[in-house]
Image: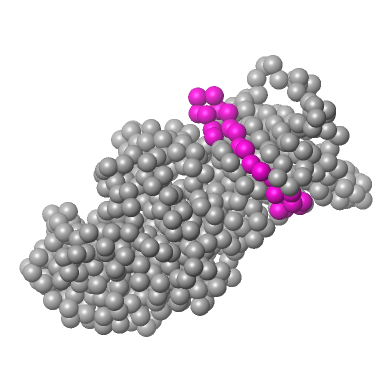
Amino acid sequence: MLLPLTALILALVGSSIGQVTRITSTKGPLFIDELGRSRIFRGTNVVYKAFPYVPQTTANANPVLSFNQADVDVLAAHGVSAIRLGVLWAGVEPTKGNYNQTYLAELTKIVQMCSDAGIYVLLDFHQDLMSERFCGQGVPPYIVDTNPTANSGAAGFPFPLSFSSYKTGSNGNPSNADCQSKIWSLYSTSQSLAVLFDQLYNNKNGVRDAFISFWTVVAKTFLPFKNILGYDIINEPLPGDIYGNSALLDVLTANRVNVQPFYDVVSTAIRDVDPNAIIHFESIPLIQKEVGFTKAPGDAQYSSKSVLNFHYYDTVQSKLNVSEAMGFRINSAKTLNCGVFMGEFEMGYGSGGSTLPSILTTFQAADTYLLSAVGWEYKDYVPDNALVMTGTNNGLVDPTNMSVRQDFATVFARPYAHTIAGTPTSMQFIDTTSVFTLDFAFNGQPDAAGLTEVRGRFDLFFKNGFNVKVTSSSGAFGVLVGDSKGGSNSVTVGPCLNNAPQSGAQVRVTIAPKDASDSSSPSCPISTTLALPGPSGATVSATTTTKTSGSTAPHCLSIRIIALLLALAIFIS
């Protein structure tokens, strides 16, 4: 029996479509994989701030607290290519020198599930206010409890660390009520918190050494995985001991004096384990136009393996709109000769979807800048009676019934180019017309290195099917619709077998709704028209065109292994 040709294509090219290939460097906002292709990422944060600091991974998990195969399937179906995964020091090393292998195994499950789905993972040491002792999370209690300076109940901190005069929650931490009444003053009044950051930056009482040991264990654990997008050394660092050194009140000074040298030391330790590590480094979050860093972590040789990871919230970056903030961060990255990545922005559903316009604006701006962006966050991840006082959110999935919010999906799952076989020059999705365009200079490579992939949840935007057209200044391209598992959340473009475009060819990919005027004989020159199963059972007409001295390119189907496919089809018939 002759297998359908489409099924053969997807089965045999499946390892190339959505292929997980190691990210090896950065070039401005673009990530470069081991095949030399440009990568752009879209996705969400997955950060579980309360004990046990990791979502539930089992199939029967509480859906409000889960990140299991069902969750991965939901994200993959919406074109997600990256998550920023919370890896908390308190989870890895709950007591001094004892590393929790169960915790690491749960994180490994998540990374493996994501890898299988073609989703990359940014490992994020997530802290807010350092510890539950300060109404935050991230650092193990033993770091605070055995540290005589940070545990002094110094003047200015709203309550002594013994909490003897307050009703406590779990594990001797302050209760939610106490934290609610004091959380807003912690950043500016907590001398003990400031001192603890100082000890971390300057290795007082061995705090930085312990932190490096934590990251070393994490790096060794995830070294085998190709889908690691990098190591985010510390989420939203604070200046340090502003009480002992008032100059640190200037966040640019604090970045240069405290944070930058700290990143140098920690990144060196991670790179000793993983020489190809992509290091993400964050500024103190109160920055506006400038960041204050004079170089990326490590020596100049590592600048292309370093990424300025920034967050945007209009309540913090009050002087800038999101597009302006992106522009300034990209300019900073150019100065530092490193990459740039948007690690957080407001992506909660809000009241009845009130945040959707701002989320849409953010993704539109990211498209313009060819910038990767992951929003905050996938789910709230707050168990009952948990002490979580900082930044919880939910967006794509409604926690009341665990259904996908379709209005949210229309801004979250817009088509974008995840993989580009060359250097992109522009990318745009016009939301009012549902027309996607990508322009790029082709790298001239065959096989997997020559594949370009567009992701998104296409059925939301092309309810009656869509056309894919590819124009090129030389040669021709073919098109495949569908991911490696037969889903319709991707479109892959590759060079034709017998008329491959030259290196540097200027290529435009257009994906547009199919309308009544579309037919099997369009007015534009056609190389190939291939009918493939479309979203919701619709028929997708995937066409390719070429600009070669005004003539029509020779007939071709796509992808250089077509000869093998045909041979195999004959063999098994």
Q: Quadrant of residue 384?
A: bottom left
- Please indicate, yes or no, whether residue 537 appears anywhere in the rendered image: no
Q: Which residues are magenta?
A: 428-452
Give percent across and percent down for residue 519: 75, 20
Q: Is residue 60 above or below residue 210?
A: above
Residue 185 drawn above or below residue 94: above
Q: From the viewer's side, name the closer residue of 112 and 29.
A: 29
Image location of residue 120, percent across then percent down: 54, 56
In the picture shown, does residue 81 fall above or below 558? below
Between 184 and 191, the residue placed more toward the observer is 191
In front: 340, or 142? 340
Q: Residue at x 24, y 72 (%)?
A: 198
Q: Is residue 296 left or right of residue 479?
A: left
Q: Tell me if 572 is positioned left or right of 217 in this view.
A: right
Q: How is the image coloured?
A: one colour
Residue 277 at x, y percent in the picture: 52, 68
Q: Quadrant of the N terminus?
A: top right
Image point (51%, 78%), residue name: 272
Instruction: Specify the quadrant of the image occupied by residue 249.
Output: bottom left
Residue positioned most to the top: 517
Residue beneath the point at 76% across and 32% down:
546
Report x, y in % for residue 54: 41, 63
Tell me which corner region of the image, top left, top right, bottom left or bottom right, holds residue 103.
bottom left
Whether residue 275 is visible here, answered yes or no, is yes
Q: Is residue 22 magenta?
A: no
Question: Does residue 236 appear to the left or right of 541 in the view shown?
Answer: left
Is 439 in the magenta?
yes
Please give the count of numbered marks on the rendered protein: 0
Q: Residue at x 68, y 39 (%)?
A: 506
